[in-house]
Amino acid sequence: MRVTIADVARAAGVSKTTVSRVLNTKGEVDSKTAARVRDVIASLGYVPSSGAVGLARGNSRTVGMLVPSLTWAWMGEVLQGVVDTVEAAGYGLLLFTFNRGADSVERFTTQVSARAFDGLLVVEPENTLDKIIALSHKGLPVVLIDDRGSHPDEFPSVVTTNHEGGASAARHLLADGRSRPLVITGPERFGCVRDRLGGFREILPTDLVAVGDFTELSGRLAVEQLLAAGTPFDSVFAHNDISAAGALRALRAAGRSVPDDIAVVGFDDIPMARHTEPPLTTVRQPTRRMGETAARMLLGHLGGTTAPDEPVVLPTELVVRQSAPLAGARSGSNSGSPAGSSPAAFSVGSVPA
Amino acid sequence: MRVTIADVARAAGVSKTTVSRVLNTKGEVDSKTAARVRDVIASLGYVPSSGAVGLARGNSRTVGMLVPSLTWAWMGEVLQGVVDTVEAAGYGLLLFTFNRGADSVERFTTQVSARAFDGLLVVEPENTLDKIIALSHKGLPVVLIDDRGSHPDEFPSVVTTNHEGGASAARHLLADGRSRPLVITGPERFGCVRDRLGGFREILPTDLVAVGDFTELSGRLAVEQLLAAGTPFDSVFAHNDISAAGALRALRAAGRSVPDDIAVVGFDDIPMARHTEPPLTTVRQPTRRMGETAARMLLGHLGGTTAPDEPVVLPTELVVRQSAPLAGARSGSNSGSPAGSSPAAFSVGSVPA
DNA sequence: CTGAAAGCGCTTACAG
DNA sequence: CTGAAAGCGCTTACAG
């Protein structure tokens, strides 16, 4: 049924070894012989069985990718970057999630032991870094796409400039004369959250910090509570676009004008960001490039290149839209000393410490 | 290095055949022997090589999935449904896109011939149905997740109720007293577009049809042009949420109130739909379930179950939000004869026929 | 430049 | 209930 290397050898009147050699352009083959073999391959429509090749060579020409969820807005870009790069290199991509708890974890580790793939790309599902590290120690090449700011030095990783991203948001607001910003963060346990907050406060110190959980609700609640408390603020920096959207909604419901009364800056630049009302100024994460870069690093590693010791850093980029336009695009406003000393940080997310 | 079935056999004092038998619970094995073998397997941490198993058995316990793009808002849900189902069955999922043109196509067909996977799930990249059909004729089990309404009867497929979905949108608007709707469609060549339009017009005839292309821009332009022409309309039915968002934006810019002046209904229920201003009433596609169902059908097929001849139909569901609330939630409004006869259908998408 | 043979790590008749 | 042997479809020393 299936045409094998033996069929090709027979039809071309050569040994399987020779066929294999022209297939892999390995070793010297008489050019006339090679041409004949190639003709036979073409006419028979022969394609080597990936399974057999893998078994004989001891690798699978496949990389695995592990992600916490496929439905997050920015995950599609990461995946697309990975798939494009991996496909272009002639590798396959095997996709895994840890969506179904311990069961998933077990199945995944089995696949690893089964040598179903040669290397692993991972966007870390929460609390699995130790497991990933263990796999890496056992010899599995791993590259981390570090959305959390975990900074492991066990294996190479691709990160973005969370600190500088926060700072750029602050600079933008400061240039527009904003001096009392509210920061709506993600869960405090994430390194990226600490970095974004740190970068922001270095430029624009503030103690109006609402600890959110990256949900729209947490953004809405943060603004509603501040409004209810009567605490004055002139801008919002949300740690992701979803919670920024929540902030926008709460401001609109309260009749506050964005950006005239309150400017709003998000983080991520997911597709939705350009469709909020008003369109959202946000710190863009280079998600697709992060996927591409991580994939390239892993493929390089498989090919023998030694991976960089330091995390590869890809820059964020401030995307200016109407929710926080360029300075001067508004009427007057002014400085005043940054940072007040009123309400302490408060929490609006359902976040365990 | 790697522990093989031979290592296990040696350590347990049995043949590889016996180890294989307890591994696959196939054939009779003395329970004491079996227990001993299992102990050895556990203590050695033995996991069969998937490559070797695949080669010996002639299958790969892997299914392929081919999608046009990974960055579409609803694709993540489909993928998640597929991955969950496939993982639960102990299969792997190999992901492919046709993003990079002819090159991708070639690589993909090669993987098929290489028997890298046992069956294929496909969300059809445009103009590839003939290729998929060819693969299917060559014996590759295929299940189509038919977002386009292509209706091929070459292989099993999962579809949603596009016709009824359109009708449900119309019924909702009609119940709210709307009589002059604008329909913003997707590209006319898609079966789903014709079905949605047909279902809608059966309930609420209209000749205000703007042929869009599923982009935000096309939704915006459709409304702007109608507004500029001074053509009266009291509602919008957009064939996807993105173009509905465009319509919302144009209406807002023109100072028309939604839903008081104009009610808006979208299609898909992507995550963004709940964050538009106002939140979007929309016809929900059961994307995750479509992924799950297609995966289950394919796995069943691989397991020997014969797939249904007819497409499996999963129902849409109208999700009511503020852009088109329930009848009675607004003030007065009235009927008037449905359908005028003014402007003919117009086109706002950059769509080839 | 070319080929026979062993080997990759399993499964599956076949024989007992 | 158990095992020896062949086979899945390749690659890779080794020998010529």
Image (cartoon, coloured by chain):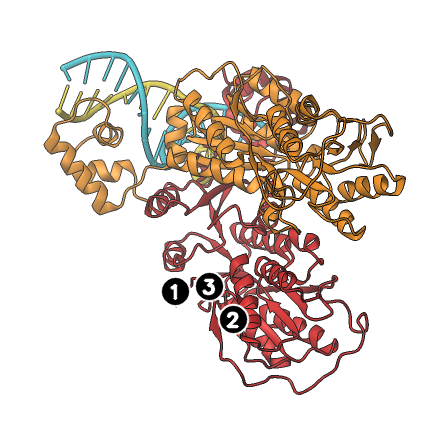
Chain colours: A red, B orange, C cyan, D yellow
Q: Are marks 3 and 1 in contact (CB under 8 Å)?
A: no
In the rendered structure, the answer to whether residue B247 lies left or right of residue A67 reads right
Q: Amino acid at mark 3?
A: Gly
In the rendered structure, the answer to whether residue A265 lies left or right of residue B319 reads right
- Residue at the (59%, 48%) spot, across then down: B274
Pinpoint residue A127: horizontal percent, then vertical percent: 39, 59
In the rendered structure, the answer to whether residue A260 lies left or right of residue B42 reads right
Seen from the viewer's position, the closer of residues B264 and B70 is B264
- Residue at the (59%, 75%) spot, across then down: A199
Q: Most extreme residue toward the left, as rendered?
A: B32
Nearer the camera: disc 3 or disc 1 = 3
Question: CA gap, disc 3 to disc 1?
Answer: 9 Å
Seen from the viewer's position, the closer of residues A150 and C14 is A150
* Secondary structure type for disc 3: loop
Chain letter for the residue marked with disc 1 in the picture: A
The residue singled out by tag 2 in the image is: A210
Mark 1 or mark 2, which has the lower sequence index? 2
Circle 1 packing at 10 Å, graded few (<14), some (14-19), many (20+), is few
Circle 2 packing at 10 Å, graded few (<14), some (14-19), many (20+), is many
The residue singled out by tag 3 in the image is: A349
- Residue at the (37%, 26%) spot, across then down: B56
Pinpoint residue A316: horizontal percent, then vertical percent: 65, 64
In the rendered structure, the answer to whether residue B23 lies left or right of residue B304 reads left
